[in-house]
Image (tube, rainbow, N blue to C red):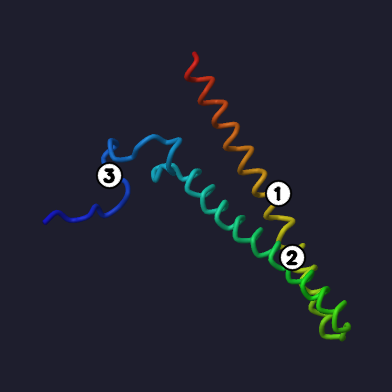
Amino acid sequence: MATAPKSNREIPDIDRGPAHTAVDPFDDVLVRRARLKRISSLGQRTGYGLYVASLVCGAIGIRWGYTPLLATLIAVALVVGSMLLAPTIVISHGIKAAEREERRAAATRSTQ
């Protein structure tokens, strides 16, 4: 029975596949970018979820009346949602710009 390789560095080049379709396990930049993309996506989903929660709490307050607890929940959801969304949106745009630049550079290299 064959044993699994001890690290990604032992995997032959033929098993890596095209770099543009999957994260290249040998490129630290792509690995870090993929990790930041996952974190950014989670932060955005959480931030927008908190915005939705504040809207739901606002609708509850309109329907059944506002209480100090409800007003606090709305304020906290909006503040924490904004604190999560601001950096994650910037990171997301940065990642998209880097990927777009890499595609342009690869296209330029392939036409030369």
Label 1 neighbour load within 10 Å: few <14, some 14-19, many 20+: few
Q: Position of residue 53 (x, y in %)?
A: 73, 71
Q: Position of residue 112 (x, y in %)?
A: 49, 13
Looking at the rendered image, the disc whose residue lies closer to the viewer, 3 or 1, is 1
Alpha-carbon span between mark 3 and mark 1: 35 Å
Q: Position of residue 47 (x, y in %)?
A: 70, 63
Q: Name above or below for residue 107 compared with residue 33.
A: above
Disc 1 marks a residue whose amino acid type is Val
Instruction: Please give the residue where the numbered disc 2 appears in the rendered image.
Output: 81
Compare marks 3 and 2 and give the one earlier in the sequence. 3
Q: Position of residue 60 (x, y in %)?
A: 81, 78
Disc 3 marks a residue whose amino acid type is Ile
> Left or right: 93 with respect to 63?
left
Instruction: Please give the residue where the numbered disc 1 appears in the rendered image.
Output: 90
Alpha-carbon span between mark 3 and mark 2: 42 Å
Which quadrant would residue 50 be assigned to in this image? bottom right
Looking at the image, which residue is at 11% across and 56% down? 1
Looking at the image, which residue is at 64% across and 48% down? 92
